Image (tube, helix red, strand yellow):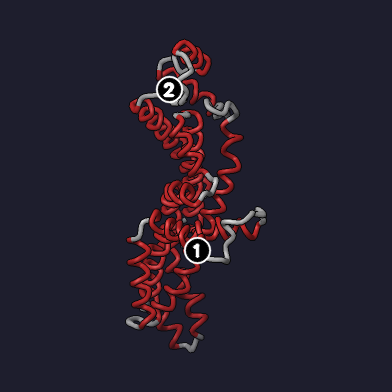
Amino acid sequence: MLRLIFSRLLQGVFVLLIISLLIFALLAAAGGDAVSALDNSRISEETRKTLRRIDGLDRPLRERYWNWVTEAARGNLGHSLVLHVPVWRLIRLPLLRTGVLAAAALSIAWLVALTLGIAAARRAGSWIDRLCSVIILLAASTPRLVLALLALALIASTPLFNVVGPTTDSATEVWSIRVIPSAIILSAPLVALFLAQTRAAIREALDEEFVRAARAKGVPEWAVLLRHTLRPAAGPLITTSGFSLGGVMSGSVVVEKVMGWPGLGQLTVSAVETRDIPLLLGVTLVASAAVMAGNLVADILQRLNNPRLR
């Protein structure tokens, strides 16, 4: 287990270096910087040159990247070129908000997948099995942007949600208007993926010899599902959950922008619009590290679930 963690950490460092280099190169190829993104015609060219010199934007690309990497290795992600505050201070709260949204989306996807998947696997060809097929098709084919716009229209037209009058910023209001709808939208592709895998894995496990033997011995059906079926079926789901974290993080950009949730997604869009390279690099680095940490947790859970992989 320790060897797995150590190897994943080494791979993670290498991947983060590649990601940061790609982001740096793509931004350089796109042209422009934080100074040129300033929409103010009253700023003279001489002032812009001074600002570039102060922010180090007049230095060669290789030197700027090396300076950023050496500082990042010490835990310093630099300062925002637009807001002039430490990048980590800007990232902390949005990271927590996006983490809450991602955890809620994964929880919804797991709940729907396990509930409907087990029922559909036990009753192949029934109405609930056909309902699961329809849910999988709709959830997988409907873009998150469309779902977000539909959710906004529903929230605005439903008197249960207070979106016109004065807001109280209470926890109940935040969860009912922002978190829960955003999490449902974010979980839609995950529901399709998890539900399809759960139904197939449970159905395959129910046909195994050890499950038939347990039933022949008179083991109750609930015990057959919990003790003999869920554990072998959980393997693919754990792996898929780890791999789906990247999709959750990328999908949060659209969902947070449309739903007005101030997480990493909105911060990423703002950094791109203002050409704030240190902020964009910091957001990308933290988001990538979070995805790799999730994959590591999934690998550890996979080995705990299946002793043959240890």
Q: Give the residue at x 48% y 29%.
A: 276
Give the residue number, with chain letter if any, for mark 2.
Answer: 36
Circle 1 residues within 10 Å: few <14, some 14–19, many ≥20? few
Q: CA distance from mark 1 to mark 2?
A: 41 Å
Residue 168, given in percent of the width and then of the height, sits at 67, 54
Residue occupying the point 45% across, 20% down: 41
In the rendered image, is residue 304 in sight?
no
Q: Is residue 43 visible?
A: yes
| Residue bearing mark 1 | 157
Residue 52 placement, left or right of 160:
left
The residue located at (48%, 80%) in the rendering is 224
Residue 128, image quadrant: bottom left
* As drawn, 57 above or below 266: above
Q: Amino acid at mark 1?
A: Ser
Q: Tag 2's secondary structure?
A: loop
Q: Which mark is residue 37?
A: none
Residue 126 as seen in the image, left or right of residue 170: left
Q: Position of residue 137 (x, y in %)?
A: 33, 67
Tell me if 228 is positioned left or right of 95 in this view.
Answer: left
Q: Nearer the viewer, residue 156 or 19?
A: 156
